[in-house]
């Protein structure tokens, strides 16, 4: 599996550390129902068979967090953007991104 | 047919023409008392104990592929009960006790071999951690023995004790641990369940649930609707995909774990050994192949294969622990999909849908759990109450904070 780092170009996945689903959003701790929302944020995952947007950390390269879109059934990597670009583009609009 | 020395002899003399298939291949009935989704080890053992211990025989096991095509036929066959936390240890010790009587119980040769399981330690701190684990096991009445270097050298002289980077100081031994033949475990349970009237329906995928007013009434399958009073799901790595159909979001990620087997060799590895630094464990099958594996690849996956980085890591760790295996040739490698839970421990519980029960979260350690998982899941389904050793394996423990996290790593499934 090779991951196209937006900074470094295509690199072996072994250079990266995996974090997981990039679409879960840290809830507002002061909002009503925060306890339940935090449980969902920390524990519950869509875990799709198919396209998955996920955080990887390029430890053996630029040391940036990036968001990779990958097919969990075939391991095909569709593309990658920086975590920042992902957030700004509205990628964090919730778990629907992984639906 | 009951298997015995006599039946083997009789069939040998008649040219082995008298053996019969060990389970039927029935068409599904319109309705059952209980449907189990998933014909892996856990689904089959659940059906077996439902019939044998709880008198429920109007039961179907529905399997999308063939029996044994999932993790039950892909694991490295290690059985042990060397857990630390009470919520786990009592459960796995029940499993160990069931393993000890299993072959007599279901009259099938599952090649249960209590050859011992040794976890190596390489530092003073790690020795203390294993001493603590061993003590926790003994408190639950489970056997555990802390071996120093001398005792371990006697048992396993072939280890690289003076490895420059990771010298071996000793190990924690559970003598009653060992291995069992994974396929035979599935077949033995399938046969025992079938003999008692359970229908095992292969090549039939569950594609949805029939839920009426919040109560489960059956399943939709590739062979049509099959109704049931109760439905239990034991779909291992595919749990999320199945439970999606009931609208449930779970504390589960699916990950791939690889394993490897070498050409057959003379007996050289006499027990099960796990390396204490980096991930590697090894045993030798009765056929002679070295069976070994390591860690998860580490990323979400539904592909039953992994990548080369983990192959390299596993082989390096193996060379650091037992350099003599370096000349053995690897014959095969494969992967299986693990239902990794958020605390590394399993779930056997009811769900918010009445009559729908869930068995999942086995991570990479569910083979050893096969007997107890079936016993406890059957108990839950038959009596609507958890088995006494499985009271902590709850689905809501993540929300209530009662997680069972053996390694204390938190909600990061690829680290458990
Ligand atoms: C490489 C590897 C090594 C391992 N080593 C060990 C070990 O040494 N010791 C240990 O204790 N554990 C080990 N495990 C873990 C163990 O194999 C699993 O935890 C355990 O087998 C899971 O339970 P099961 O047997 O019921 O799963 P499975 O055999 O996977 O059964 C689940 C079944 O559900 C079926 N299914 C899924 N979706 C549907 C559907 N929609 N409709 C119908 N059927 C469906 C699948 O086809 C499958 O047959 C290992 C696993 C792997 C992959
Ligand atoms: Zn980079």
Image: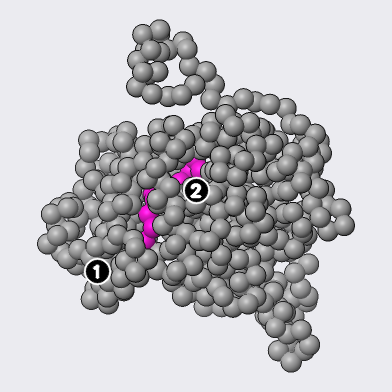
The label nearer to you, 2 versus 1, is 2
Residue at mark 2: C-beta within 8 A of ligand 1: yes
The disc, 2 or 1, on the residue closer to the chain's N-terminal end is 1
Q: Residue visible at 71% across and 89% down?
A: A29
Q: Residue visible at 72% across and 79% down?
A: A36
User: In front here: B93 or A97?
Assistant: B93
Residue behind mark 2: B370
User: In front here: B90 or B297?
Assistant: B90
User: Which segment is the magenta one?
Assistant: B72-82
For label 1, count other residues whose C-alpha is less than 10 Å away and answer few (under 14), some (14-19) or many (20+): some
Q: Residue visible at 21% across and 42% down?
A: B268
Residue A75: x %, y % from top left? 60, 53
- Examine the residues drawn in magenta and state their main secondary structure: loop
- Whether residues under marks 2 and 1 lie with C-beta atoms below 8 angstroms apart, the answer is no
Q: Taking A43 as reference, is B34 above or below it?
A: above
Q: CA distance from mark 2 to mark 1?
A: 31 Å
Q: Residue visible at 74% across and 38% down?
A: B32
Q: Taking B322 as reference, is B149 above or below it?
A: below
User: Which labelled disc corresponds to residue B122?
Assistant: 1
- Is residue B241 something that shows in the picture? no
Q: Is residue B76 magenta?
A: yes
């Amino acid at each position: 599996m090779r991951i196209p780092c937006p900074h470094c170009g295509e690199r072996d996945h072994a250079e990266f550390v995996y974090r997981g689903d990039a679409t879960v959003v840290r809830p507002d701790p002061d909002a009503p129902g925060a306890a339940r929302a935090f449980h969902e944020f920390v524990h519950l995952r869509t875990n799709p068979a198919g396209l998955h947007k996920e955080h990887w950390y390029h430890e053996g390269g630029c040391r940036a967090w990036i968001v990779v879109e990958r097919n969990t059934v075939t391991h095909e990597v569709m593309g990658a953007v920086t975590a920042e670009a992902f957030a700004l583009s509205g990628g964090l609009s919730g778990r629907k991104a992984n639906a | 047919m009951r298997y015995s020395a006599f039946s083997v002899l009789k069939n040998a003399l008649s040219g082995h023409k008298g053996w019969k298939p060990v389970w039927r291949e029935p068409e599904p009935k319109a309705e059952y008392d209980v449907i189990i989704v998933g014909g892996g080890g856990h689904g089959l053992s659940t059906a077996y104990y439902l019939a044998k211990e709880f008198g429920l025989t109007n039961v179907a096991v529905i399997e999308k592929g063939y029996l044994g095509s999932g993790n039950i036929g892909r694991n490295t066959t290690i059985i042990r009960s060397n857990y630390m936390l009470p919520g786990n240890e009592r459960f796995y010790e029940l499993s160990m006790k069931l393993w000890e009587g299993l072959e007599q119980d279901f009259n099938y040769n599952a090649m249960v071999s209590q050859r011992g399981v040794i976890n190596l330690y390489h530092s003073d701190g790690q020795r203390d951690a294993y001493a603590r684990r061993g003590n926790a096991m003994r408190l639950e009445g489970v056997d555990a023995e802390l071996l120093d270097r001398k005792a371990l050298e006697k048992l396993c002289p072939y280890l690289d004790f003076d490895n420059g980077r990771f010298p071996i100081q000793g190990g924690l031994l559970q003598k009653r641990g060992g291995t069992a033949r994974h396929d035979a475990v599935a077949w033995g349970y399938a046969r025992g369940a079938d003999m008692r009237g359970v229908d095992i329906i292969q090549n039939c995928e569950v594609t949805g649930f029939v839920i009426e007013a919040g109560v489960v009434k059956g399943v939709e399958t590739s062979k049509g609707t099959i109704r049931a009073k109760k439905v239990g799901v034991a779909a291992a790595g595919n749990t999320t995909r199945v439970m999606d159909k009931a609208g449930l979001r779970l504390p589960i990620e699916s990950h791939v774990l690889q394993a490897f087997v070498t050409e057959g060799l003379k007996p050289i590895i006499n027990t099960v050994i796990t390396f204490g630094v980096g991930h590697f464990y090894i045993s030798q099958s009765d056929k002679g192949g070295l069976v070994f594996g390591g860690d998860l690849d580490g990323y979400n996956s539904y592909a039953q294969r992994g990548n080369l980085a983990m192959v390299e890591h596993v082989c390096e760790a193996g060379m650091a622990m037992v350099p003599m295996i370096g000349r053995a040739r690897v014959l095969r490698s494969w992967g299986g999909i693990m239902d990794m839970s958020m605390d590394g421990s399993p779930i056997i519980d009811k769900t918010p849908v009445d009559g729908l029960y869930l068995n999942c979260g086995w991570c990479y350690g569910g083979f050893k759990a096969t007997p107890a998982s079936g016993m406890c899941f059957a108990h839950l389904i038959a009596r609507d109450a958890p088995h006494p050793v499985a009271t902590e394996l709850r689905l809501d423990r993540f929300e209530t904070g009662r997680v069972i996290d053996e390694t204390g790593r938190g909600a990061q499934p690829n680290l458990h």
